[in-house]
Every structure is written in C-alpha cells, then in structure tokens.
Image (tube, grey):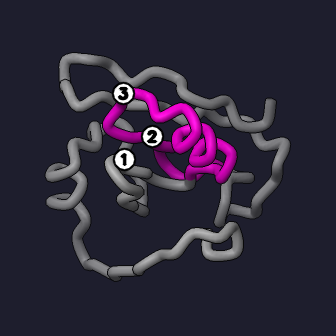
C-alpha cells in the first residue's frame, strides 16, 4: 500500500476481534488485517483496484472485505489473474454483504 502512495500507520495487535466488532466487520468476512481508510473499513487482502474503486465511487457502505487469505491476493503470492470476490458490507447488520469487485476479471 505504501508503494501505491498510501500513507499508512501500522499497529500490531495480539487480538483484533474488538476492533473488528467496533467497526462492524461481519463475522463471515473477518480476515487477518483490518484497516481504516477515511470513513471506510478495509478487511483482509483487498486488491488495490477495489480500494481505488471504493475511493472513486464513494458508495454508501461501511467497508469492503476479502474473507480469509485467497491465493493470488496481495500478500499471498500476488497474481493479477487470481479470481476472488471483494465484498461490501453495510452499517446495518440486516443487510447481507454483496459483491463489490471481482478480482481477476
């Protein structure tokens, strides 16, 4: 993310569960990394293209996430052709996550 021009602040924590809960990350989308980007939450190995889409479109969502650690995602042997979904989730827990970006297409 730094190479892409983002200014980042890293906070290593032993337990991210309270942070994920505080920011409303749905349990089924939890991953190993949680980031705050302005008003949005970025969860997991989200590709740069999805973050750029989030910033340019500014949708009414709480955040975007890639559950687990899909092979080919950033940090997992990056492969621009790897296929996996980036999901968006709302502030309201009654709304189900929906596909926001399809990596590898």
Separation of marks 3 and 2 at Cα, in angstroms? 11 Å
Whether 12 is among the magenta residues is no
Residue extending farthest to the top is 95
Which residues make up the magenta segment? 46-70
**For this view, does 91 lie left or right of residue 66?**
left
Relative to 42, residue 57 above or below: above
The residue to which callout 2 is attached is: 64
**For this view, does 36 lie left or right of residue 8?**
left
Q: Secondary structure at mark 1?
A: strand
User: Few, some or many C-alpha atoms within 10 Å of disc 2 (few <14, some 14-19, many ≥20)?
Assistant: many
Task: Identify the residue shown where x is 38% and y is 24%.
Answer: 97
Q: Quadrant of residue 105?
A: top right
Separation of marks 1 and 3 at Cα, in angstroms? 10 Å
The residue to which callout 3 is attached is: 60
The residue to which callout 1 is attached is: 40
Separation of marks 2 and 1 at Cα, in angstroms? 8 Å
Which of disc 3 and disc 1 is earlier in sequence?
A: 1
Task: Identify the residue shown where x is 62% and y is 31%.
Answer: 101
Q: Secondary structure at mark 2?
A: strand
In the image, 97 versus 60, the foreground residue is 60
Q: Quadrant of residue 77?
A: bottom right
Relative to 10, residue 27 above or below: above
Q: Quadrant of residue 24?
A: top left
User: Few, some or many C-alpha atoms within 10 Å of disc 3 (few <14, some 14-19, many ≥20)?
Assistant: few
């Amino acid at each position: 993310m730094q190479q892409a021009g983002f200014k980042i602040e890293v906070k290593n924590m032993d337990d991210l569960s309270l942070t994920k809960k505080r920011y409303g990350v749905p349990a089924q989308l939890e991953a190993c990394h949680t980031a705050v980007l302005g008003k949005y939450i970025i969860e997991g190995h989200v590709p740069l293209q999805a973050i750029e889409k989030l910033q340019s479109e500014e949708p009414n969502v709480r955040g975007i996430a890639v559950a687990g650690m899909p092979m080919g995602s950033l940090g997992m042997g990056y492969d621009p052709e790897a296929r996996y979904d980036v999901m968006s989730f709302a502030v309201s827990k009654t709304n189900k996550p929906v596909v926001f970006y399809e990596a590898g297409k």
